[in-house]
Image: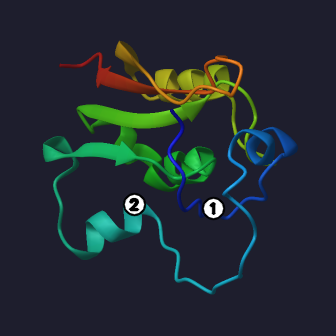
Amino acid sequence: SQNAGLSSSFLKMTSLHLENFPDSKFIAEESVDVTTLELLAKKVNLNPQNMLLKMDVQGFESEVLKGAGNLLSVIPACYLEVSLSVLYDGEFGLLAILNFLSDYGHEVIDLYRGVTSKTGELLQIDILTCSKQL
């Protein structure tokens, strides 16, 4: 069964999203402060070698990954939700995300089934990547 609930994203929902999650609808726009992981880690003195980058950012994965910058090459593991079908305008697909992570030395070590459509089509999966340097 599908979970009814809140969906918030910087990106606009596609018709596929709206068809499969009818309880999701545009309600309001809010202003939020945005920074990058690279700047935040430096500001609070985090060692990226001790990080697990966990993302569930509703189609905004490419921007989070870009904002991690060179930290990605030393972060040991990433766990993220990825759409197999475009649910948000402008989101990266699975292949683009895997290629991006691979460029920083990460490879997939496990996959987890995620949300399915009303017809049973798999829409999202969770992936766990690990740095090849470990």
Left or right? Give the position of 18 relative to 122: right
Calculate the distance from the C-alpha at mark 2 to the C-alpha at mark 1: 18 Å
**Residue 53 pos. (x, y %):** 31, 44
| Badge 2 amino acid | Leu
Instruction: Single out the residue that lies furthest toward the right.
Output: 15
Is 34 drawn above or below residue 20 in the view shown? Answer: below
- The residue labelled by disc 1 is 9
Q: Position of residue 22 (x, y in %)?
A: 73, 51
Does dot 2 land on a helix, a strand or a loop?
helix
**Residue at image x 63%, y 47%?**
59
Give whichever of discs 2 and 1 has the lower sequence position. 1
Where residue 56 appears, as percent x and y from the top left, is 45, 48
Q: Amino acid at mark 1?
A: Ser
Q: Residue at x 22, y 48 (%)?
A: 48
Q: Secondary structure at mark 1?
A: loop
From the image, tell me which residue sits under label 2: 37
Please give the name of the residue rendered at 44% of the width and 51% of the height, measured from the top-left corner: 68
Neighbour tally class for label 1: few under 14, some 14-19, many 20 plus, Cα within 10 Å: few
Which quarter of the rendered picture does the C terminus lie within?
top left
Work out whether 45 lies above or below 11. Answer: below
Q: Is residue 33 left or right of residue 86?
A: left
Looking at the rendering, which quadrant does residue 70 occupy? top left
